[in-house]
Image (cartoon, rainbow, N blue to C red):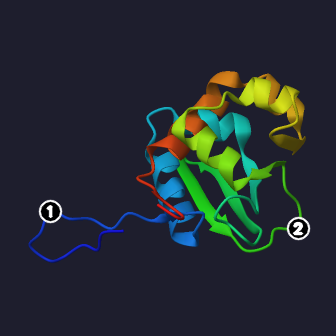
């Protein structure tokens, strides 16, 4: 992990799955050129659950709210949402594969490697918008546990 030093080109790279990493994901998603359409189609709260595995020894869970208003996109982390539109759950090594682009979501879901629950119809009818979310997930500069 590199810490930014004033007057230096070095930047801080957050560790997955930290709250700081999720905040960077929120910024990446809000800045995506297709974010307004994705937010209009997929608006709601999404829960990301990272189960223990590999170097991660305890479960992590983050809720992210995606919305659009007055042409602007808002993507924020929320604490313990009561109602979520979709939950994405898998263990740390598979999250790592997903974020590196080494694991395709479709087959991973089919074979139970990634579990998605909630409003699956919205996801199935908006594949291009789901790709926007994955583009943002993969765009975050990431430090991996144990690396």
On screen, residue 51 versus residue 72, left or right, reads right
Residue visible at 72% across and 25% down? Answer: 126
Image location of residue 16, percent across then percent down: 55, 61
Front in this rendered view, residue 70 or 32:
32
Q: Residue furthest bottom?
A: 6
Give the residue pinned by disc 2: 82
- Image quadrant assignment for residue 49: bottom right
- Is 107 placed above or below 113 here? above
At a point 55% along the width and 33% down the height, the residue shown is: 101
Q: How many marks?
A: 2
x%, y% of residue 9?
A: 14, 62
Can residue 71 be seen at all in this image of the molecule? Answer: no
The crowding category of the residue bearing disc 2, from other C-alpha atoms within 10 Å (few below 14, some 14 to 19, many at least 20), is few
| Image location (x, y in percent) of residue 5 | 18, 76
Q: Residue at x 69, y 55 (%)?
A: 92
139, above or below 10, in the image: above
Quick one: SS at disc 2?
loop
SS of the residue at dot 1? loop
Q: Tell me the CA gap for discs 1 and 2.
A: 41 Å
Figure quadrant of residue 103:
top right
Q: Which mark is residue 63?
A: none
Residue 108 visible in the snapshot: yes
In the visual, does 109 lie left or right of 22? right
Closer to the camera in the image, 21 or 100: 100
Which label lies toward us, 1 or 2? Answer: 1
Can you tell which quarter of the image residue 61 is in?
A: bottom right
- The residue tagged 1 is 9
Mark 1 or 2, nearer chain start: 1
Residue 85 image point, x, y percent: 84, 49
**Quadrant of the snapshot with the N terminus:** bottom left
For image coordinates 80% across by 72% down, the residue present is 80
Mark 1 nearby-residue class (10 Å; few <14, some 14–19, many ≥20): few
């Amino acid at each position: 992990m590199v810490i930014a030093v004033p007057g230096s080109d070095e930047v801080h790279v957050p560790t997955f799955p930290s709250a700081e990493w999720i905040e960077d994901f929120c910024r990446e998603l809000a800045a995506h050129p297709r974010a307004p359409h994705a937010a209009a189609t997929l608006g709601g709260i999404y829960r990301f659950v990272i189960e223990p595995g590999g170097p991660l020894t305890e479960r992590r869970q983050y809720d992210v709210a995606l919305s659009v208003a007055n042409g602007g996109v808002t993507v924020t982390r929320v604490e313990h949402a009561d109602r979520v539109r979709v939950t994405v759950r898998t263990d740390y090594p598979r999250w790592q594969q997903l974020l590196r682009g080494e694991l395709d979501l479709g087959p991973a879901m089919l074979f139970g490697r990634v579990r998605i629950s909630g409003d699956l119809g919205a996801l199935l009818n908006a594949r291009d918008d789901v790709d926007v979310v994955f583009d943002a997930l993969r765009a975050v500069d990431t430090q991996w546990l144990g690396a």
